[in-house]
Amino acid sequence: MKLVLSKDIIKRTIPAVVLTSAITVSAAGIITGCGAKDNQKETGTNIQETTGNSEEKQNTTENNVAEQENNGNKIMEEYRSLFSSNSSIQETVEFIDKNISLVSIENATAMIDEFEKLQKEYLPKLEEKYFNGDTIQAELIKIYMPDFDISKLNKIEGIENAELKELLTETLGSGYKVETAEGTFFPVIDYEFYKKYSGYVTSDIKEYIDIMAVESNNPPAKDAALVISWEEVLNRALNQEKFINKNENSIRIQDIKNLFNKYMTFTLFGLNNTPLFTYDTMTLDPEAKEAYLSAVEKADGNNFLETLGEYMELLKKNNYKLTDEVEQFRKGIQ
C-alpha cells in the first residue's frame, strides 16, 4: 500500500526537523567553543612556561659569560703578576700553556703579545750566557762541527756537559732556539714555538706568527750573504706586503713593515757577500734576473711587483748594468 502524507503533516514535520538541526548545531558550537577556550587556557600556560624557560636560559647564558669574563680577568691579573715577581720565562710559558684556552681571544692575544715583548727583553741576557767564558762555545762547536747539523743543538738528549745542558734546557723551554753565524752560536726567538698558540689568538697575530716562523726556521742571511734564493726573497716580500695591506690596524703592523723594508733592500741591493750586481762588471746577477723577470709577469696590480717591474724596465734600458741612473732609482725607492 502506498503511503501518502498530507500537506498538514508535511508542514508540521519540516519545522521540527529544522529546529532539531539548529539545536544540534548550536550545541555543537557551544561544546566546540568551550573546548577552544580550554585549549586557549592550556596554550596560554604553555606560552608562559616557554617564555619563562627562555628568559631563564638567557639569564644563565649571561651569567656564564660574565663568570667566564671575570675568570679571564683574574687569569690575566695573575699572568701579569709573573712579570713583577722575577718569574723565569719557563714559568711564564707553563702558565700560558695551562691558561690560554681559558681566556677570551682578546686576552689570549694580549698574553702572546706581552710574552713576545718579554722574550725580546730577555734575549740579550740569554746571549750573555753563551759568551760567558770559552766553555759553552767550545762545547757547541764540538757537537756541531762533525756533521754541521744545527738541529742537534736544539735536542738536549746526549749532551754530557752539565752547564751546556742546563743552558739549552732554559733556551728551548723559554721559546728560543740556537743559531750559528760567523763561527759563533747564539739564541734567537723560535717562532715555530708560537704556533701552538695560533688557535687562540686573532687572525692577524696568527698570520704574524706564520711569517716570523718562516724567518726563524730558515733565516734569509748569514755572514753577510743571502742563504735563500732570489725567488724566495720575492715570495717572502709578497707575503709581508699582503699582511700590511690586510692588517693595517694590527699591533704587529710596524714589525712587518720593518721586515718588508729589509726584504726590499735584499731585492734592490742584495748583500755584501751576495750583491745584486757583480763587483767586477756591475752586471745584474743572472739568477736574480731570471727570478725577477718571471715575477713581474704576475704583477696584477701588486705594488711591490709593479715597483720591481719599473726597476727591471730601467735595467733593460741600461743593459742590466748598475749605472748612476739605476743607482738613483733604487736609492729613491729605499
Image (spheres, rainbow, N blue to C red):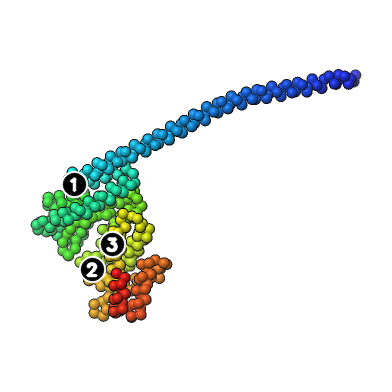
Horizontal side of 99 relative to 87 (left or right) equals: right
**Residue placed at 52% from the left, 28% from the top?**
46
- Label 1: state its secondary structure: loop
The answer to whether mark 2 and mark 3 are in CB contact below 8 A is no
Q: Is residue 94 visible?
A: no
Question: Under tag 3, what secondary structure?
Answer: helix
Looking at the image, which residue is at 80% across and 21% down? 15
Q: Nearer the viewer, mark 2 or mark 3?
A: 3
The disc at residue 258 is 3
Q: Position of residue 25 (x, y in %)?
A: 71, 24
Q: Position of residue 69 (x, y in %)?
A: 33, 40
Q: Quadrant of residue 72?
A: top left
Instruction: Tell me the residue that label 2 is attached to.
Output: 225
Residue at 38% of width from left, 67% of height from top?
A: 303
**What type is the residue that disc 1 sits on?**
Ser
The residue pinned by badge 1 equals 88
**Which mark sits nearer the N-terminus, 2 or 1?**
1
Vertical comparison of 87 with 243: above or below: above
Q: Nearer the viewer, residue 16 or 139?
A: 16
Image quadrant of residue 321?
bottom left
Residue at the image point whose x is 37% and y is 36% from the top: 64
Query: What is the spatial separation of the Cα atoms under label 2 and label 1, in whole angstroms?
Result: 35 Å
Three-letter residue code for mark 2: Ala
Mark 2 to mark 3 CA distance (whole Å)? 19 Å
